């Protein structure tokens, strides 16, 4: 388990992180969402022990990560800008990884080599951005880490490879118990892979939620009522947003499906249905409840 306690970090007068607190459960896939400049990359570098925060601590199973080789042996960090040794091939990097990570698996490497079909004897500096990303994923997962930290890993991948990488990460978490943190500015990329998501904005972690809980607690409702109908007539339901086009009423309600169904039946609509919300719609609701204007967050 990763515990982040009151982590703050500044670069001169620029405040990058402000009292960040979070817990990442073992075997989960945690999505760290934030716009450019929100502090995601700084947070990942602190998590893997590359930089030391001005204040606060990061621990793995109660052990500090800073200057702790035992803990770092279990962590692989896939940065947004991958670094490979000059003029090296994937096989050259494999040899390097094996000297650093005692858990490196040649069997896993062989399986991933067949999946990604990259030429492992070709110099990596001749690869495209997407191919370099694939190479970093191959090497990182082959190291069999307990914790995998990914910074914008899906950027530069074509849609087919993107889904392939997501499937591999999900399988490693479900079957191998690997804990994954994925930092991204793209909400849509996180929706079909993460168990838990946290929103980082201007260095502050505004909230952390389990995705299933978020989806089960908010629902979009579309309904048709006879005669005049306004939002005030939906009480005691907690309504977040209300619109009407002709006879069609649309709104977002907080509560379980059963609670919403019971209250909607009592309103006696001509027709109604509940529609699943996207992660982006859920975040908009959460942000508006906290008083933030989501439209100004540059997602």
Image: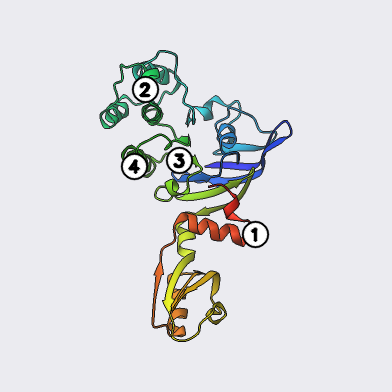
Q: Which mark is residue 35?
A: none
Residue projecting furthest to the top: 87
Q: Quadrant of residue 34?
A: top right
Which of labels 1 and 3 is toward the front?
Answer: 1
The answer to which of 27 and 77 lies nearer the viewer is 77
Residue projecting furthest to the front: 246
Q: Residues within 10 Å of mark 2 (few under 14, many from 20)?
A: some
The residue tagged 4 is 163
Q: CA distance from mark 4 to mark 2?
A: 20 Å
Specify whether residue 249 is in view.
yes
Q: Earlier in the sequence, mark 3 or mark 4?
A: 4
Q: Earlier in the sequence, mark 4 or mark 2?
A: 2
- Above/below status of 67 relative to 32: above
Q: Earlier in the sequence, mark 1 or mark 3?
A: 3
The residue tagged 2 is 127
Q: CA distance from mark 2 to mark 1?
A: 45 Å
The residue tagged 1 is 291
């Amino acid at each position: 388990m990763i515990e982040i306690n009151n982590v703050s970090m500044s670069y001169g007068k620029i405040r990058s992180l402000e009292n960040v607190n979070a817990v990442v459960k073992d075997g989960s896939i945690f999505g760290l969402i934030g716009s450019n400049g929100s502090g995601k990359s700084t947070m990942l570098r602190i998590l893997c022990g590359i930089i030391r925060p001005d204040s606060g601590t990061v621990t793995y199973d109660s052990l500090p990560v800073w200057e702790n080789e035992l803990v770092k042996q279990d962590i692989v960090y896939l940065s947004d800008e991958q670094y490979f040794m000059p003029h090296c091939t994937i096989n050259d990097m494999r040899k390097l990884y094996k000297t650093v990570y005692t858990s490196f698996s040649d069997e896993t490497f062989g399986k991933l080599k067949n999946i990604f079909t990259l030429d492992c004897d070709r110099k990596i500096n001749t690869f495209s951005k997407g191919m370099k990303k694939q190479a970093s994923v191959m090497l990182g997962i082959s190291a069999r880490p307990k914790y995998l930290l990914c910074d914008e890993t899906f950027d530069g991948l074509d849609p087919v490879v993107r889904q392939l990488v997501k499937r591999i990460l999900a399988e490693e978490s479900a079957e191998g118990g690997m804990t994954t943190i994925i930092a991204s500015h793209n909400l849509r990329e996180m929706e079909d892979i993460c168990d838990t998501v946290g929103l980082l904005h201007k260095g502050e972690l505004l909230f952390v939620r389990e995705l299933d809980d978020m989806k089960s607690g908010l629902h979009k409702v579309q309904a048709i009522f006879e005669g005049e109908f306004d939002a005030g007539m939906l009480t005691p339901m907690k309504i977040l947003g209300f619109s009407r086009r002709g006879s069609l009423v649309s709104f977002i309600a907080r509560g379980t499906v059963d609670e919403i169904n019971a209250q909607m039946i009592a309103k006696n609509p001509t027709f109604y249905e509940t529609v699943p919300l996207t992660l982006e719609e859920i975040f908009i609701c959460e942000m508006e409840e906290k008083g933030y204007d989501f439209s100004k967050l540059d997602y």
